Image (spheres, rainbow, N blue to C red):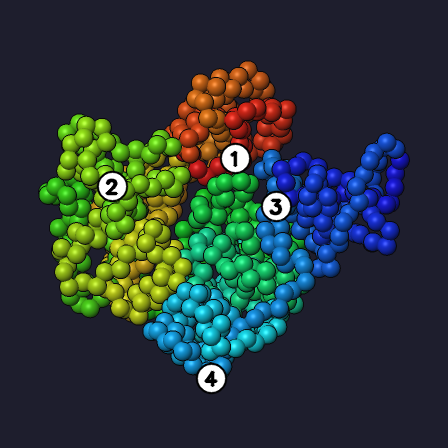
Amino acid sequence: MTTDSTVQVLLPLALDDAYTYLVPDGMTLAPGDYVRVPLGPRLVIGVVWDTGGEVPDTARLRAVSEKYETPAMPELHRQFINWVAQYYLEQPGSVLRMALRVPEALGAPRQQIAYRASGQQPQKMTAQRTRVLEVASDGLARRTPELAQEAGVGASVVKGLVKAGALEAVTLPAMAAFAEPELNHNRVELSDSQTLAAADLRKQVTGRGFSVSLLDGVTGSGKTEVYFEAMAAALAQGRQVLLLLPEIALTGPFLRRVEERFGVPPAEWHSAVRPRERERVWRGVASGEARIVVGARSALFLPWQRPGLIVVDEEHEPAFKQAEGVNYHARDMAVLYGSLGGFPVILASATPSMESLWNAGKGRYGHVRLEARYGKAQLPDISLLDMRAEKMPSGEWMAPALTQAVAETLGKGDQALLFLNRRGYAPLTLCRTCGFRLACPQCASWLVEHRFRGRLACHHCGHEEPVPDACPSCGSENTLVPCGPGVERLAEEATQRFPDAKIAILSSDLSRGVLLRDTLQAIARGDYNLIIGTQLVAKGHHFPQLTLAGVIDADLALETTDPRAGERTWQMLAQVSGRAGRGDKTGRALVQTYMPDHPLMQALAAGDRDGFLAHESDIRERAMLPPFGRMAGIIISGSDRDETGRFAQSLLRTVPDAKDVQVLGPAPAPLSMVRGRHRFRYLVMCARDVDIQAYLRQWLGGIKPRGSLRLAIDVDPYSFL
């Protein structure tokens, strides 16, 4: 029978379809409503995906338990979730789970309790209590975490002062409101090229239709101020704006720049945001009150009420690709969202991805270029250091020419940067007596020594253990030696060579959250004059006093199985070099390489981006690699290697025949074991016009792995480990 008294509720679980529930008397439900429904013995939050439907007479349906009085999920957002699921061959419920990460936001807002000084002194005073009372004495009410953080103490100190009567409670509004942006608050004077670019982007926004614009500008060209103008145009229409960033490390500086430009702090969304603030932002986006959001890739799945523009900054960054769970690419899904919602998308980068450049070349994207740096700043000169000709003592990693250049730079009072994309002290530790290598017990990888913490760590599963005093294999003492450099070892060498330098190390192992923010601000002020870092330093930072960039191992990224290795190496080296000379002084970059004749290195030194792209495009097109073809990775994993291998091999017998499709494998994945699970891989390659999703559904749609076996599909893969 067909009935209007039922609804189809999608649950945030690994489910292909919505479940049917009865609508209780007196409750009115419509698509998009958030509800609580019974599932087995528990209650689960879900979203009404549809109303009515075919229900067998014998069906024993359960009723919806509760409807949340919060703005319904817009139809556009539900369409987006369905499209993401179809494109990446995921269950819609798994995608919905990413949109329901803040269930607390669905209930009534909870009142906040804050504290301020009461005027009473506790009987017992300590240095920590004194600091808290000094902070609280300004009369402002602060919540416990805020008061503890400002005073540099633990929450228990604040609670002790409350109990002693030295702090009094104050009730604050449940959620602080989001201020309205001021569109002309602090507009900067644009150059002629910036003015033309901004006019182009504003035109796309005011046209109130879907478009994609590639904002392609050299490092230091002022791309941010240009797309700020497009953001202002979208805000003037009463719409919401999302600014996507690839790394949490970038959000702090960008939040300040957005606030300086629009007069109000934007909403912030990423994994480091406190739960209470995440609840506030989710509500603000759902109501339309949060007008500007700066966030990581997951911000796409906020329940946008009036989206008017998405800006994807550093669009080339691999960090936009989700590596676990739903393997979506935020850049590509931002374009999809804009297409579904009929609003513009801006992709910005100094080193655009080949996919975006290809789309711009085909006329699918607009191409807005900024070919000169803003103001008087000039692009740095780049020189190659041929490491084959250098006579390097054992255990040293800086060529004499680079050492001299750093010394000269520091002597002038300028800043220098040393870049090495390896975390820790050394990527490998072995015994010089028996040759034993310290490996991760759960992964097919070596343990990386982190000498500052006295630990060995696996960068794939997170396993850690102390550095042993003796070889675990032969028992010899004092025979474990580090092989190769990481940033910690490079910092050790730099300290010996430049004893008077003020060194800052930028690595995700050492600098996070408040520490990273403070370090970046200190570098910008000039408190440090020698910066040593991993890829963290290559992502959009502006250090006006930095005039020298040195790359320790330019060949590192080329030594992988990644078909995008050349492109990624180019992007990283160009971005690192581009940190130099962004102020009034001329910059330069020195690149240490054992392959100076490689076309990529020659193009980098000559500043010949078009030459590199032509060379890389020719390789990609002949190999049918993206953007000239399509790819999908299939990873089969399991706890037993033989069983996993047999299951992977059995899939080969069911591969469908299809024109312009090539299936490679199965073969052990380059990283053949992760977290104790053995891994085998297939790679599917096809022409651009092939419906790769339909092909994969035909091949794998009916496959149900059993036991510990798992099958994961990665459409448009970015990781080839």
Q: Residues within 10 Å of mark 4 (few under 14, many from 20)?
A: few
200 left or right of 542?
right
Disc 2 on helix, strand or loop? loop
Of label 1 and label 3, which has the lower sequence position? 3
Q: Nearer the viewer, mark 3 or mark 4?
A: 4
User: Marks 4 and 1: which is nearer the front?
Assistant: 4
Inspect the image, locate mark 1, and give the three-letter code of the amino acid beneath it.
Asp
What residue is pinned by disc 4?
119
Q: Secondary structure at mark 4?
A: loop
User: How far is the residue under mark 4 from the one under mark 1?
Assistant: 61 Å
The N terminus: image quadrant: top right
- Report x, y in % for residue 264: 53, 73
Displayed quadrant of residue 305: bottom right
User: Which numbered disc covers residue 97?
Assistant: 3
Q: Of the residues shown, which amino acid type is indicated by label 2?
A: Val
Of labels 1 and 2, earlier in sequence is 2
Q: Which numbered disc flags the more N-terminal residue, 2 or 4?
A: 4
User: Would residue 201 be visible to someone looking at this image?
Assistant: no
- Residue pointed to by mark 1: 714
Q: Residues within 10 Å of mark 2 (few under 14, many from 20)?
A: some
Q: Looking at the image, which is closer to me, 341 or 711?
A: 711
The mark lying in front, picked from 2 and 4, is 4
The CA distance from mark 2 to mark 3 is 40 Å
Q: In the image, is residue 405 above or below residue 451?
A: below
Report which residue position mark 2 lands on: 467
Taking the view exactly as shown, the residue that stands out farthest to the top is: 653
| Callout 3 secondary element | helix
Q: Mark 1 or mark 2, which is nearer to you? A: 2
- For the residues labelled 2 and 4, say whether their Cβ atoms are less than 8 Å apart: no
Q: Foreground residue, 63 or 162?
A: 162
Q: Residue at the spot x=42%, y=34% of the render?
A: 675
Mark 3 belongs to which amino acid? Arg
